[in-house]
Image (cartoon, helix red, strand yellow):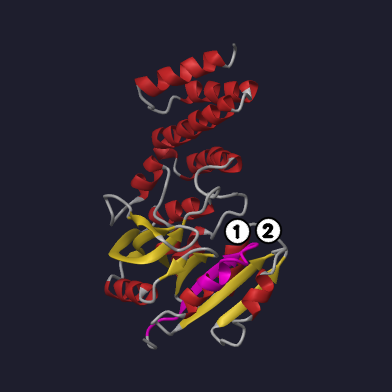
């Protein structure tokens, strides 16, 4: 497909020499041809720049080199250079199947009232072997703001195509965030527009040992986001309190398990203060763990 609106695919890379070629080939290998691929090398210290340079002859590729500023800043840099009406994001170790972009362009053209569309996602391991399909559960379409907020997770951004006008009006990616910049952006989009779902499995997300789950900075992202969300949506305070309380409980549990009792005590104390409608059982567990921090 060569007609239709321009699509800007933003690929970010940081020390991704082992993976970036696959990501770029999957983006450049789309059946939809009216596409530009903007790859932002975010200060890699490995051979990523050399790997990326192998694709420089493709005139659809824009290569950006910058000092390391983090994934949110790298995505914003790509967004600032994007010419397309539609934007999608791909991480260095993930892949799109060839019909990924075409299906999303067709869907959004047929549904002008929808601002973002996402596809089915398959999970693969470090070697590219399937780990089984991973699809976002119900509800899959429509107004997903409350669903995202209550679950504390959005659909995978690597499977999502967004209208550029909406991305710009919501302010892009928050560069203060370490790893929840995608959740923050998609939640803000969900507050403004409906999401559509393409059930076909067209995105492959790679899971590697040591990359899954929450890191300490990501827990702290949640506390920053809770304050941010209360200012954006004061009417959603109960749901936001629950979002923060859940993160406080999980982070406190991690700290307690690591023997960092004073820090864990702070987290459980905050949880008990916020409450957040966590339920009697979770509240009781948090109280027990708080008391254990004093032993």
Which quadrant, please, contains the N terminus?
A: bottom left
User: Residue 17, percent across and down?
Assistant: 63, 67
Q: Dot 1: few (<14), some (14–19), or many (≥20) neighbours within 10 Å?
A: many
Identify the residue at the far top of this view: 295
Camera-side residue: 90 or 241?
90
Residue drawn at x 68%, y 72% as measured from the top left: 49
Q: CA distance from mark 1 to mark 2?
A: 7 Å
Residue drawn at x 47%, y 54% as measured from the top left: 207
Camera-side residue: 5 or 234?
5
Residue drawn at x 41%, y 21% as measured from the top left: 283
Residue drawn at x 54%, y 32% as measured from the top left: 251
Task: Identify the element where label 1 is drawn.
Answer: helix
Magenta range is: 4-22
Residue of label 2: 69
Disc ID at residue 271: none
Residue of label 1: 71
Task: Identify the element where label 2 is drawn.
Answer: loop
Residue 164 visible, this orientation: no
Instruction: Give the quadrant of residue 195.
Output: bottom left
Residue 258 visible, this orientation: yes
Q: Dot 2: few (<14), some (14–19), or many (≥20) neighbours within 10 Å?
A: few
In the image, residue 144 sits, relative to residue 228, either above or below, namely below
Looking at the image, residue 119 sits to the left or right of residue 273; the answer is left
User: Residue 107, percent across and down?
Assistant: 30, 72
């Amino acid at each position: 497909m060569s007609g239709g609106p321009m699509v800007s695919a933003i690929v970010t890379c940081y020390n991704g020499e082992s993976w970036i070629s696959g990501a770029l080939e999957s983006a450049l290998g789309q059946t939809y041809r009216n596409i530009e691929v903007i790859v932002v090398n975010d200060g890699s210290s490995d051979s990523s720049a050399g790997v990326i340079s192998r694709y420089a002859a493709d005139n659809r590729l824009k290569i950006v080199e910058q000092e390391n500023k983090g994934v949110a800043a790298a995505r914003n840099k790509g967004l600032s250079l994007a010419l397309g009406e539609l934007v999608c994001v791909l991480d260095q170790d993930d892949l799109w199947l060839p019909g990924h972009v075409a299906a999303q362009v067709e869907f959004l053209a047929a549904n002008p009232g929808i601002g973002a569309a996402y596809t089915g996602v398959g999970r693969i391991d470090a070697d590219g072997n399937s780990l089984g399909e991973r699809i976002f559960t119900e509800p899959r379409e429509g107004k997903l703001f409350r669903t995202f907020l209550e679950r504390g997770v959005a659909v995978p951004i690597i499977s999502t195509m967004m209208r550029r006008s909406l991305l710009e009006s919501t302010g892009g990616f928050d560069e203060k965030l370490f790893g929840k910049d995608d959740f923050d952006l998609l939640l803000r989009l969900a507050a403004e527009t409906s999401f559509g779902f393409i059930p076909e499995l067209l995105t492959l997300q790679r899971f590697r040992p040591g990359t899954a789950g929450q890191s300490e900075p990501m827990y702290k992202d949640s506390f920053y986001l809770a304050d941010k969300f209360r200012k954006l949506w004061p009417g959603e305070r109960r749901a936001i309190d629950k979002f923060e309380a859940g993160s406080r409980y999980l982070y406190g549990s991690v700290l307690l398990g690591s023997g960092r009792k004073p820090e864990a005590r702070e987290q459980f104390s905050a949880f008990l203060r916020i409450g957040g409608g966590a339920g009697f059982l979770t509240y009781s567990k948090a109280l027990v763990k708080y008391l254990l921090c004093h032993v």
